[in-house]
Image: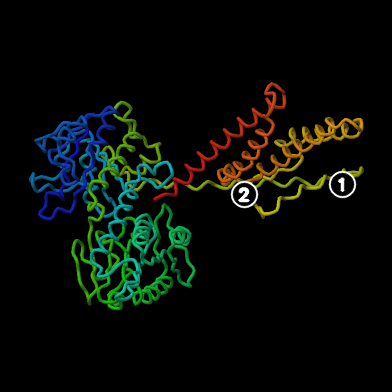
Amino acid sequence: MRIAVVREALATDPLPLETRVAATPDSIKRLIALGFEVSVESGAGEAANFPDSQYVDAGATIAADARENYAAADVLLKVRPLRERPDLGADEVDLLRDGATVLGFFYPGRNTELLERARAKKLTVLAMECVPRISRAQKMDALSSQANIAGYRAVLEAANRYGSFFTGQMTAAGKVPPAKVLVIGAGVAGLAALGAAKGLGAIIRSFDTRAAVREQIESMGGEFLEVTFKEDGDGGGGYAKEMSPAFLEAEYALFRKQAKEVDIVITTALIPNKPAPKLWFKDMVELMKPGSVIVDMAAESGGNCDVTVANEVVVHNGVIVLGFTDLAGRLPTTASNLYGQNLVHLLTDMGGAKGWKVDFDDEVVRGATVTHEGEITWPPPVKPAAAPAPAAPKPAAAPAPVVAAPVAPPAPTKSKGHGHGGGGPKVHLGSARSAPLTWLSIVALALSYFLLQNAAPDATGLHLFAQQLTIFALSCFVGWQVVWNVAPALHTPLMSVTNAISGIIVVGGMLHLSGDLSRPAALLALAAVLFATINIGGGFMVTRRMLKMFHR
């Protein structure tokens, strides 16, 4: 099968809005490993800093004739939706052969005419923005990978236009307060913006109709703004839903109050397949201080701000409003790399060149497919909710038995600290897992007691052995109970703590290594030192790897 990578149509317009490319040299190597032949239009990656020579080195062929590249494609990889190519004097839909497959952003909800043309051409179109947001599909989620970049870039654009520091400073000439940044919408783009603004030293706060994102905002050091009117805006799949008029009025009142305080506003609110909701009105803009900046990340869908103009910078009452629609494309190399990998993962899921299949039993493929074999398949059918299991009929009450019922054993007492339904297994003396060790401990204690009671008064060595055996048995029992009742999330910190215990074992073992090393006690001490040292080394390695996860 032949994959074609082409120049994005917008990059051929007088204003080069699209700098990304659908495949990079790295992703092309993986596509070839999947069995595809890859043909790249000459100059397709130049705006993303990928010259033709890098594509050739990766194993692709360079197509000098763009029309032929379209016509020969079994699979076309795109970033933007299919549209007219002014430099070729033709539309991309017409340039493709009937029955070809297209992977890229498509937006079927607002491109109904394009959707119908793709159906008439019998194209199989997989829209990357329609990939379902489920755990298995995270590696194919192009919306998230590009929104993450766009949110980061939005803060950089705001900082470039803002006339002061983001971080506060105390100088000999006077004090400079930190910038206050408000992010509306705490999805992927919003959280990326919050992280970037916090990294620059700003005071960050965010509003979202979904109460579930509170912890994410606060974990980044931000303030979660909320209205007194209670209504959850979670629309499922990581999106927000449209809110009631009463909630919106309370929301607007909050925004008007914030407009007087904040220096930077970044809006990210989108509703799938609908125009962006208006959230920041003209009077709110006029309440902001001159020199403040608004970055409207929903500009391409109509904008969240009243005064936003797509692809333009508007100054209203001294407030700078940025309506850029190419924020991800302003980091073209990274954006293209991530997007190219999203496409590779989706093509892998479809079987590669040898096992190619548009499998509607695959939830990811079915969700992303908008047209197939002359039919419009969007939106995908909604899975019916599982019907609740019918309640089992209550058995007829049995007559009371004449004999006395046996007394039930008392229920085991719950461990303190877990609470109702708390996490972490609860171990009791009668549990199946601890039973063998419990019986071993009881036998060891009984043996110790017997030796202590029956040993001769002068049998000092026997008394000492019995005491040490008792301590060993109790240590095994207590250690088992303590470790087993620790929640799994704390196992790695627990391993770090046990390094101290292992250190004590090493010291104790070294004290017994003096003298004849062939003695049983010396051999046991040597084994104890060896295993405790291994435990210490492994514990520190695991701990170090865990701490690296938190390094920036």
Which label was assigned to residue 400? 1
Write down the quadrant of residue 55 in the picture: top left
Write down the quadrant of residue 198 in the picture: bottom left
Q: Earlier in the sequence, mark 1 or mark 2?
A: 1
Label 2 sits on what residue type? Gly
Above or below, 107 relative to 221: above
> What is the count of numbered marks?
2
Real-space Cα separation, disc 1 to disc 2, in angstroms: 39 Å
The x, y position of residue 159, in whole percent, is 27, 64
Q: Nearer the viewer, residue 54 or 71?
A: 54
The x, y position of residue 350, in whole percent, is 34, 34
Find out whether the residues at labels 1 and 2 contact each other: C-beta distance under 8 Å.
no
* Residue at the front extreme of this rendering: 515
Above or below, 163 relative to 513: below
Q: Does dot 1 land on a helix, a strand or a loop?
A: loop
The x, y position of residue 24, in whole percent, is 23, 39
The x, y position of residue 260, in whole percent, is 34, 77
- 374 to the left or right of 531: left
Label 1 sits on what residue type? Ala
Q: Nearer the viewer, residue 222 or 212?
A: 222
- Answer few, some or many: residues within 10 Å of disc 1's Cα (few below 14, many 20 plus, some between 14 and 19): few
Quarter containing the N terminus: top left
- 360 to the left or right of 418: left
Q: Residue at x 62, y 38 (%)?
A: 502
* Residue at the top extreme of this rendering: 518
Q: Which residue is mark 2?
A: 423
Q: Does dot 2 land on a helix, a strand or a loop?
A: loop
Q: Colour scheme used in the picture? A: rainbow
Q: Nearer the viewer, residue 280 or 479?
A: 479
Above or below, 25 relative to 203: above
- 143 to the left or right of 4: right
Between disc 1 and disc 2, the foreground one is 2
